[in-house]
Image: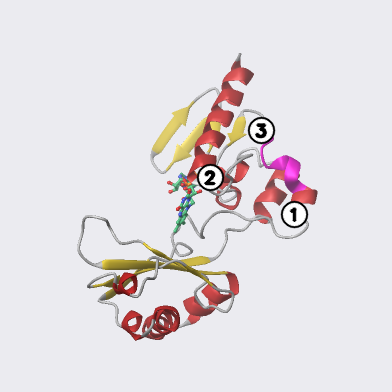
Amino acid sequence: VRVRAGREAYRGDAVVIALAPTLAGRIRYDPPLPPLRDGLTQRMPMGVALKVHALYPEPFWRADGRSGVSSTDTGPLTETVDNSLPDAPGGVLTAFSYGAQARGLRRLPQDARRDALCEALAAIFGPAAARPDDLVEYDWSADEWTRGCFCGVLPPGAWCAYGPELRAPVGRVHWAGTETATRWSGYLEGAVTAGERAAAEALAQLG
Ligand SMILES: Cc1cc2nc3c(=O)[nH]c(=O)nc-3n(C[C@H](O)[C@H](O)[C@H](O)COP(=O)(O)OP(=O)(O)OC[C@H]3O[C@@H](n4cnc5c(N)ncnc54)[C@H](O)[C@@H]3O)c2cc1C
């Protein structure tokens, strides 16, 4: 197997590709991937989530007897958690928006998005939440090497049509990445066990 990355080149007896399927599909293969494996990479997009940290001078919600944990289906924020550091001053509410609501927020100019986020936090935690010292957001969908959050997802029909291609090696090319995990898929634990499984599979193949 020969792998080229910019000016670097590597040779090996096998390769493990530890990427979400849609990102793995952006690599150029020679010979090209078999149609069903390539079909899977076309049908497993990254999820859409927006994660934001709201920084306050103190975790004011605790004084009201609140945990900072919330969950709602009315949006635009789907859930929040108290993410304040135990040994640092200040309070942090970490909030998530998912799917269509996250897309709606992304389409807003930054100032309008911040206003919408502050309004949503205030609707849950009261007026003090509307005035964070700072809002920290990172657009994982814009990151060239991630392109979404939290992981690749199978839309209706894709699993039945292309499921067998998720883990099946293509010659000496083996597939890891959290999406291939049989447990904790989409989480760090799944990424680790998927890497172990793919490495064991490659070693077994090489005898
Ligand atoms: C905002 C956010 C919050 C999350 N929170 C949690 C959490 O609280 N708990 C949890 O368990 N999981 C969480 N996750 C999910 C967790 O991050 C993933 O499940 C895990 O990182 C997947 O690991 P991976 O090795 O499969 O892929 P990745 O971690 O995506 O690693 C793939 C690597 O390949 C690189 N890469 C991409 N394309 C190429 C290419 N063409 N050539 C070479 N390298 C390439 C990337 O830069 C990256 O370093 C979160 C994810 C996001 C985005």
> What range is drawn magenta here?
162-168
Mark number displayed over residue 169 = 3
Distance (Cα) linking label 3 and label 1: 19 Å
Q: Would you place residue 163 above or below residue 79 in this image?
A: above
Q: Helix, strand, or loop for circle 3?
A: loop
Of residue 67 and residue 205, the one placed in the foreground of this image is 67
Residue assigned mark 2: 19
Mark 2 crowd level (few <14, some 14–19, many ≥20, 10 Å Cα): many
In the image, residue 184 lies in the stretch drawn in magenta: no
Distance (Cα) linking label 2 and label 1: 18 Å
Q: Position of residue 19 (x, y in %)?
A: 53, 45
Give the amino acid at mark 2: Leu
Residue assigned mark 1: 158
Q: Position of residue 118 (x, y in %)?
A: 38, 81
Q: Residue at x 65, y 51 (%)?
A: 41
Give the amino acid at mark 1: Ala
**Which quadrant would residue 16 be assigned to in this image?**
top right
Badge 3 residue CB within 8 Å of ligand 1: no
Q: Would you place residue 136 above or below residue 192 in this image?
A: below
Question: Which mark is first along the chain, 1 or 2?
Answer: 2
Q: Residue at x 25, y 76 (%)?
A: 133
Distance (Cα) linking label 2 and label 3: 14 Å
| Quadrant of the rendering where the C terminus is positioned | top right
Pointer 2 with pointer 1, Cβ within 8 A: no
Q: Helix, strand, or loop for circle 1?
A: helix
| Quadrant of the rendering where the N terminus is positioned | top right
Residue 176 in the figure: left or right of residue 92: right
Q: Helix, strand, or loop for circle 2?
A: loop
Give the amino acid at mark 3: Pro
Of residue 28 and residue 79, the one placed in the foreground of this image is 79
